[in-house]
C-alpha cells in the first residue's frame, strides 16, 4: 500500500493545516485515496520515521537536507502553497522527485480581492479611511472606473484572476509575462523586458507574479517612479517583488494615489512596522487569495493529481526547476 | 426669450454649483440652450429680481414662500439632486409648476460603489481596517462572494445600480419596492410590506430608496434585528432610512458583520459623532453616487428635457406629488 505522509508546520498559516477529519472527509469524496496509508505529522515529530517508507509527501516546508538518504522511496512532493520561492534554489531536490505546487484554488478569491482593490483605489478608499480615522469629513469625488487601464504583473493563476477582475469592471487589461505570451482575459500581453513602456499608462498595477531571482524587486524604486501620481498599486503575490520603502515614500509625498498590500515580509507584519500607518496605504493580512476551505481544496487537487498518476498521465502543477515556479 | 434662472446654494455640495463657464460649455454642446436668457445667482442675492421674469428654475433648494406671487411666469423647477426629501411635503408647489429631479447620473458611480461595498463587506474589510489602525495582524479568511444573497431596498436609479452590482458579482439579488413591481437586473422583486420575509435571507442589504414619510426608519431597530450576524449593510440613500443608533449598537456587540454608510445626518458629519469610531463600520462622506462632472451632467439632462418641452413631449424625472419622489 503506497504511503502518503502529510507534514504540518504549526507556524504556517492555519489554513494549510491538514488534520485527521479532513483526510477522512477527502477519502469519502475520493475513493482512490482509500488505497493509501496516510500519516500526519507536526513540526517533524514523526518525520524521519515516516520518510523511511513515504512514497508521497504533502508539506509547506519539505525537508531538504539529505532528502534522498532519508526518504529512499519518495517520488512526489506537494507543497501546500502556490509559491515555492521559500524553497529556491531547487538544488536540494533529487532529479527523480517531482515537486508540485498548489496553484489553482486561489483564483476565485483573488478575483474578488482584486475587484475590490481596483474599485477601492479608484474611489480613493485608502484616503477616505485615513480621514475616518481623523474623524474628518472631506469629500473626494471620482468618475466611474470603466475605461481605465490596469497592468497585471504575472499571468498565472493569480494574474489571470486579476485580469478577470479588471475586465469585469470594463478596464483595459495589460498582462506582463516572462515570455510575452499567454492566453486569457487580458487585452494585451507584453514581455517583461518591456514593462517600462506600459507602466506610464497604468491607472492601476496589480502585482501577481511568482517570486524568483528574476522577479525580486521587479517593481523597484525606478519602475515605481514611472507610475503616474493618480495611479494605485496592489500586491497579492510576494512582498519582495515591490520596494515597499520606496512605495511608502511615494505615498507619503503624494506621488501615488494609494496602495493595497496583502503580502508582507516578514509575516505576520510586526506591530512596530512603519507600514501600518503610511497614509493612503491599506494593509491586509495575507488574505487576498485564500479560502477557509483551503485544506479541503488542496486534498481535492492532490486526489485529482493522484488519479492522473494512477492512470499514467502527467501531473498537473509541476514546478519547473529552471524557472522556479 | 425664455428665462432660466440658476440658483446656487453655497452651502450645498460644490458638485452642484453651476457657474458661467459651465453654462457656456453647455450652450456649446446644446444649441437649443442658446435661445435662453440665463441668470446665475448665489444664496438669493438676485433671486427676487430673477423670479419676476423666470420661466424655469434650477436650484438645490427652491424658494417655497409665496412662490406664485414672486415668480408669476415660473412653470418648471429642476432640483440639482435626485432626492427631494428636503422639499416634502410638496404643498408649497403650485399645481401648474412641474418639479423634476436629477435622477440618472448617479447610476454608474453607484454601481461601482456598491460593487466595492459588497466585496468589502464579504472580505471583512471593515474589521481589517480596524485591525490596521491597531497595528494588529489577524487574518480573517472568507469564501468567494458568488452565490450569496443581496437585498436591495428601493429599485429606482440607485436600486437598479445596486442590483447590477450584485448580479455582476454572481449574487442573488432581491429588490424591495413600494409596489412589488419593477423590471431590471434583480432576480426577484418583493413588495415592501413583505420585506421582513427576505431580510433573514440576506448576506447583504443595500439601502437605495428615496426618503419619504413611508420610508423613514424603514430599516429600524426591529428590522435590523432580523438580519443574520454574518450580514452586512450599505446605505447609499439617506441616513433617516436606517436607525444608525441601533446599527452602531449591533456592530459594537458583534450582532452584524459590518456596515458601510455613505450618507449621514447632518452632513458634514460632525467630528464629535460617535459613528466615526464604531468598530466594523466604514464611513464615506456622501461620495458613493456622485461624479465630479456632476454639474455638466445636470445641464446635459436639463437640455435634453428642455428639448422635449420644446417638442411638446412630456418631461422626464417629474416628481410625483403624492409619492414624494
Image (tube, coloured by chain):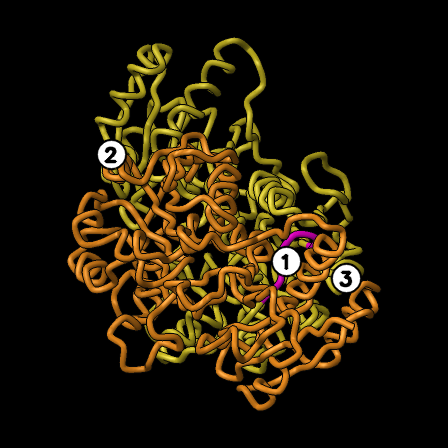
Chain colours: A yellow, B orange
Q: Is residue B97 magenta?
A: no
Distance between the Cα atoms at labels 3 and 2? 55 Å
Discs 3, 2 touching: Cβ within 8 Å: no
Magenta stretch in the rendered image: A142-149
Discs 1, 3 touching: Cβ within 8 Å: no
The residue closer to the viewer here, B86 or A98, is B86
Q: Determine if marks 3 and 2 fall on one subunit.
A: no
Distance between the Cα atoms at labels 2 and 1? 43 Å
1 or 3: tag closer to the N-terminus:
3
Distance between the Cα atoms at labels 1 and 3? 12 Å
Q: Chain of mark 2?
A: B
Residue B107 in percent (x, y) is at: 56, 52
Q: Would residue A158 appear left or right of B257 to someone viewing this image?
A: right
Q: Determine if marks 2 and 1 fall on one subunit.
A: no
Element under label 3?
helix
**Residue for point 32% across, 31% down:** A6
Question: Is label 2 or label 1 in front?
Answer: 2
Q: Would residue B152 appear left or right of A198 to someone viewing this image?
A: left
B213 w.r.t. A279: above or below: above
Q: Which residue is mark 1?
A: A205
Q: Which residue is mark 3?
A: A196
A224 w.r.t. B257: above or below: below
| Residue B197 numbered mark, or none | 2
Amino acid at each position: 500500500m503506497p504511503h502518503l505522509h502529510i507534514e504540518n508546520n504549526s507556524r504556517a498559516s492555519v489554513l494549510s493545516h491538514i488534520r485527521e477529519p479532513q483526510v477522512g472527509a477527502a477519502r469519502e469524496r475520493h475513493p482512490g485515496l482509500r488505497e493509501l496509508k496516510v500519516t500526519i505529522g507536526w513540526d517533524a515529530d514523526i518525520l524521519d520515521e515516516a520518510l523511511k517508507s513515504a512514497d508521497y509527501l504533502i508539506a509547506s516546508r519539505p525537508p531538504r537536507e539529505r532528502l534522498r538518504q532519508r526518504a529512499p522511496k519518495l517520488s512526489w512532493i506537494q507543497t501546500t502553497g502556490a509559491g515555492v520561492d521559500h524553497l529556491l534554489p531547487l538544488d536540494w531536490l533529487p532529479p527523480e522527485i517531482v515537486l508540485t505546487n498548489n496553484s489553482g484554488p486561489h483564483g476565485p478569491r483573488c478575483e474578488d480581492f482584486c475587484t475590490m482593490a481596483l474599485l477601492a483605489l479608484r474611489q480613493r478608499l485608502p484616503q477616505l479611511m485615513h480621514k475616518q480615522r481623523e474623524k474628518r469629513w472631506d469629500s473626494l469625488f471620482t468618475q466611474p472606473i470603466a475605461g481605465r487601464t490596469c497592468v497585471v504583473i504575472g499571468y498565472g493563476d493569480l494574474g489571470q484572476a486579476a485580469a478577470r477582475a479588471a475586465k469585469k469592471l470594463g478596464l483595459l487589461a495589460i498582462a506582463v509575462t516572462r515570455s510575452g505570451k499567454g492566453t486569457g482575459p487580458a487585452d494585451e500581453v507584453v514581455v517583461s523586458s518591456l514593462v517600462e513602456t506600459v507602466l506610464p499608462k497604468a491607472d492601476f498595477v496589480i502585482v501577481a507574479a511568482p517570486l524568483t531571482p528574476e522577479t525580486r524587486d521587479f517593481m523597484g524604486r525606478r519602475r515605481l517612479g514611472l507610475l503616474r501620481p493618480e495611479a494605485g498599486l496592489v500586491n497579492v503575490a510576494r512582498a519582495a517583488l515591490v520596494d515597499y520603502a520606496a512605495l511608502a515614500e511615494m505615498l507619503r509625498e503624494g506621488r501615488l494615489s494609494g496602495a493595497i498590500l496583502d503580502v508582507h515580509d516578514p509575516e505576520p507584519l510586526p506591530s512596530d512596522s512603519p507600514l501600518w500607518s503610511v497614509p493612503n496605504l491599506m494593509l491586509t493580512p495575507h488574505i487576498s487569495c485564500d479560502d477557509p476551505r483551503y485544506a479541503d481544496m488542496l486534498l481535492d487537487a492532490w486526489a485529482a493529481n493522484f488519479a492522473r498518476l494512477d492512470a499514467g498521465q502527467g501531473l498537473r502543477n509541476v514546478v519547473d526547476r529552471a524557472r522556479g515556479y
